Image (cartoon, helix red, strand yellow):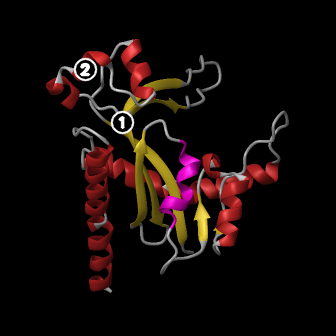
Amino acid sequence: MGGQIVDATVVAAPKQRNTDDEKADIKAGKIPDAWKDKPAKLRQKDREARWTVKFSKAKVDDEGKEHKRDIAVPVFGYKNHAAIDQRHGFIRGWTVTHAAAYDGAQLRNVVKRPNIGSTVWADTAYRSKKNEAWLDRNGFVSDIHQKKPKGRPMSEATARANGRRSKVRSRIEHVFAHLKSRMGLFVRTIGIARATMKIGMANLAYNITPYVWHEKQAASA
């Protein structure tokens, strides 16, 4: 079963400590007045990275124990949007945005057509009429998670289908874990251009891992 799995992960960058007025100027695309006469300080300020919040779902405790609360963790940096080959695990397509960018808007920037199956797996952030139409128009088969109906419980059939999708889609989480834990991916540069180069090189370097594994499998066979 071939195809592509799409997801995104936040890559942290050094935190910027700015005043509220400076933050407002940055969001508006302006250079804060206090920085204009301080070129050295301006060079150290990343005006293209953004803050976002990562939510960690709490696990259900054993019966009789108090349930843990979901955790919201603020993170500053960029996002690594990637699509991997479901069968072989290679990163086939990727792009970089600031951390607050919407995942679903990057689907068409990472999904690639040549030499790969047509099925596309992704979470509910990528489920939209616009994305579904684009996939259909370009010959892809959508197996993206279904969203819960507003004001109504999810049907058992949809829940089972999403569970099946999750088993496939979880493979990309191992890719992101490898990039962050084993490769220590962290953006220490200033600006999205350098961040894109850093993250892109890490994605390419990661592909050596599945390549070596497949070569060993072929040799042993």
Is residue 31 visible from the viewing direction of this image? yes
Compared across the picture, whether 35 is left or right of 95 comes to left
Quarter of the C terminus within the rendering:
bottom left
Q: Which mark is residue 35?
A: 2
36 versus 158 height, above or below: above
Quarter of the N terminus within the rendering:
bottom right
Q: Residue at x 51, y 24 (%)?
A: 71
Residue 30, image x, y percentages:
38, 27
- Callout 2: helix, strand or loop? helix
Residue 40, image x, y percentages:
14, 26
Q: Is residue 70 magenta?
A: no
Compared across the picture, whether 219 is left or right of 5 comes to left
Q: Estimate how packed mark 2 is, as few (under 14), some (14 to 19) or many (20 or more) residues with alpha carbons within 10 Å.
A: some
Magenta stretch? 102-111
Residue that protrudes farthest toward the right in the picture: 152
For mark 1, what is the residue?
A: 48
State which quadrant residue 82 falls in.
Answer: bottom left
